[in-house]
Amino acid sequence: MDGEYPDIAPRMKEIGARKNKLADDGVMYTLPVLSDAHTNALITDSREVAEYLGTTYSEKPNFSKGLILVFDAAVFDL
Protein backbone atom coordinates (compact mmCIF):
# COMPACT_ATOMS: atom_id res chain seq x y z
CA MET A 1 0.00 0.00 0.00
CA ASP A 2 2.82 2.45 0.78
CA GLY A 3 4.04 2.15 -2.81
CA GLU A 4 0.69 3.32 -4.10
CA TYR A 5 0.40 6.40 -1.86
CA PRO A 6 3.86 6.88 -0.36
CA ASP A 7 3.26 10.38 1.02
CA ILE A 8 0.25 9.58 3.24
CA ALA A 9 1.88 7.68 6.12
CA PRO A 10 4.81 10.09 6.64
CA ARG A 11 2.49 13.11 6.66
CA MET A 12 0.00 11.45 9.02
CA LYS A 13 2.85 10.55 11.40
CA GLU A 14 4.12 14.13 11.16
CA ILE A 15 0.79 15.62 12.26
CA GLY A 16 0.27 13.02 15.00
CA ALA A 17 -2.66 11.21 13.41
CA ARG A 18 -3.60 7.85 14.84
CA LYS A 19 -3.46 4.65 12.84
CA ASN A 20 -6.89 3.35 11.85
CA LYS A 21 -6.71 0.03 10.12
CA LEU A 22 -4.59 -3.05 9.83
CA ALA A 23 -3.25 -3.70 6.34
CA ASP A 24 -1.95 -7.09 5.29
CA ASP A 25 1.59 -5.83 5.78
CA GLY A 26 0.97 -3.84 8.97
CA VAL A 27 -0.85 -0.76 10.21
CA MET A 28 -2.09 1.89 7.82
CA TYR A 29 -3.53 5.38 7.96
CA THR A 30 -6.80 6.33 6.32
CA LEU A 31 -8.17 9.51 4.78
CA PRO A 32 -9.92 11.87 5.17
CA VAL A 33 -8.37 13.59 8.14
CA LEU A 34 -9.80 16.67 9.86
CA SER A 35 -7.74 19.12 11.89
CA ASP A 36 -9.97 21.59 13.75
CA ALA A 37 -8.02 24.69 14.79
CA HIS A 38 -10.87 25.80 17.08
CA THR A 39 -10.72 22.71 19.31
CA ASN A 40 -7.31 21.23 18.39
CA ALA A 41 -9.07 17.98 17.47
CA LEU A 42 -7.47 15.66 14.93
CA ILE A 43 -9.97 13.15 13.50
CA THR A 44 -8.87 10.44 11.05
CA ASP A 45 -11.89 8.37 10.08
CA SER A 46 -14.70 9.53 7.78
CA ARG A 47 -17.46 8.29 10.08
CA GLU A 48 -15.77 9.90 13.08
CA VAL A 49 -15.30 13.15 11.11
CA ALA A 50 -19.04 13.24 10.35
CA GLU A 51 -19.95 12.50 13.98
CA TYR A 52 -17.49 15.11 15.24
CA LEU A 53 -18.83 17.81 12.92
CA GLY A 54 -22.43 16.97 13.82
CA THR A 55 -21.70 17.08 17.54
CA THR A 56 -19.25 19.98 17.67
CA TYR A 57 -21.03 22.25 15.20
CA SER A 58 -24.62 21.08 15.61
CA GLU A 59 -26.05 24.61 15.88
CA LYS A 60 -25.79 25.13 12.13
CA PRO A 61 -25.80 22.81 9.13
CA ASN A 62 -22.40 22.07 7.65
CA PHE A 63 -23.70 22.11 4.09
CA SER A 64 -26.81 23.55 2.53
CA LYS A 65 -29.29 21.10 1.01
CA GLY A 66 -28.69 22.64 -2.44
CA LEU A 67 -24.95 22.09 -2.19
CA ILE A 68 -25.47 18.48 -1.15
CA LEU A 69 -27.78 17.88 -4.13
CA VAL A 70 -25.25 19.39 -6.55
CA PHE A 71 -22.46 17.29 -5.05
CA ASP A 72 -24.52 14.11 -5.21
CA ALA A 73 -25.44 14.78 -8.83
CA ALA A 74 -21.80 15.38 -9.78
CA VAL A 75 -20.43 12.35 -7.95
CA PHE A 76 -23.10 9.80 -8.70
CA ASP A 77 -23.42 10.75 -12.37
CA LEU A 78 -19.74 9.99 -13.02
Image (cartoon, rainbow, N blue to C red):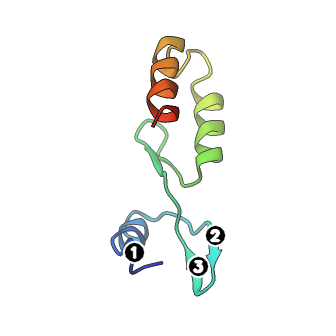
Residue 40, percent from left and from top = 47, 46
Residue 52, percent from left and from top = 61, 38
Please give the residue where the numbered disc 3 appears in the rendered image.
27
Q: CA distance from mark 1 to mark 3?
A: 15 Å
Please give the residue where the numbered disc 2 appears in the rendered image.
21
Q: CA distance from mark 3 to mark 2?
A: 6 Å
Please give the residue where the numbered disc 1 appears in the rendered image.
4
**Answer yes or no: do the residues labelled 3 and 2 have beta carbons within 8 Å?**
yes
Q: Is residue 37 left or right of residue 52?
A: left
Q: Secondary structure at mark 2?
A: strand
Q: Looking at this view, is 42 or 69 the one in front?
A: 69
Mark 2 is surrounded, within 10 Å at the Cα level, by few (under 14), some (14 to 19) or many (20 or more) other residues, namely few
Q: Secondary structure at mark 3?
A: strand
Task: Give the residue at x 56% y 17%.
Answer: 61
Mark 3 is surrounded, within 10 Å at the Cα level, by few (under 14), some (14 to 19) or many (20 or more) other residues, namely few
Q: Looking at this view, is 63 or 41 the one in front?
A: 63
**Kind of residue sitting beneath label 2:** Lys
**Answer yes or no: do the residues labelled 1 and 2 have beta carbons within 8 Å?**
no
